[in-house]
Image (spheres, rainbow, N blue to C red):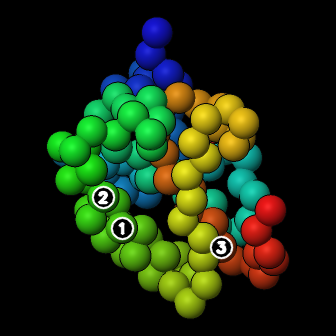
């Protein structure tokens, strides 16, 4: 079954898009944890970070580039987190790989 992110990528469900090219989509998180909370989503259906193949890992430099660009655009380049929840015990709820870009407030220590 397709995840909600696949449906957003395919245009079946609306989302607040902030970046898109052939490989990557970035959207605003619907339930933001901070003033800036974006999701950078590879369009390829990859369930988790742990499932990334060697070929999939080729996407990582571009994901970092998009994160840098969006962090600058959203005024958080001097302080943000880029993170992945891998697996349900880490808090992953949508099993289509995505990177959270979170900033715009003091984020405190990691759990
Ligand atoms: P995770 O818990 O790491 O799998 O992250 C899933 C994220 O997707 C959460 O931060 C949700 O708030 C967010 N989310 C769920 N549905 C949507 C949606 N339709 N549009 C944008 N963000 C969403």
Q: How many labels does the image show?
A: 3
Nearer the N terminus, badge 1 or badge 3? 1
Marks 3 and 1: in contact by CB < 8 Å?
A: no
Is 57 or 20 nearer to us in this picture?
57
Marks 1 and 2: in contact by CB < 8 Å?
A: yes
Residue 89 left/right relative to 50: right
Nearer the N terminus, badge 3 or badge 2? 2
The tag on residue 60 is 2
The outermost residue toward the top is: 1
Callout 1 secondary element = helix
Residue 20 appears in the figure: yes
User: Badge 3, how many Cα within 10 Å: few under 14, some, many 20+?
Assistant: many
Give the quarter of the image for residue 11: top left
- List the residue tagged with mark 1: 64
Residue 83 left/right relative to 40: right
Instruction: Single out the mark in the foreground, 1 or 3.
Output: 1
Q: How far apart are marks 2 and 1 (CA)?
A: 6 Å
Instruction: Classify mark 3 as within 8 Å of ligand 1 or not, answering yes or no.
Output: no
Residue in view at x 57 percent, y 42 percent: 86
Give the quarter of the image for residue 52: top left
């Amino acid at each position: 079954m397709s995840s909600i992110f696949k449906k957003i990528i395919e245009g079946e469900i609306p989302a607040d898009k902030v970046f898109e090219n052939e490989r990557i989509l970035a959207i605003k998180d619907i339930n933001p944890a901070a003033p800036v909370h974006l999701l950078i989503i590879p369009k390829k259906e990859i369930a988790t970070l742990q499932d990334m193949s060697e070929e999939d890992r080729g996407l990582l430099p571009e994901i970092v580039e998009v994160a840098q660009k969006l962090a600058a655009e959203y005024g958080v380049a001097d302080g943000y987190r880029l993170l992945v929840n891998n697996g349900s015990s880490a808090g992953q709820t949508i099993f289509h790989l995505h990177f959270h870009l979170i900033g715009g407030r003091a984020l405190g220590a990691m759990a």
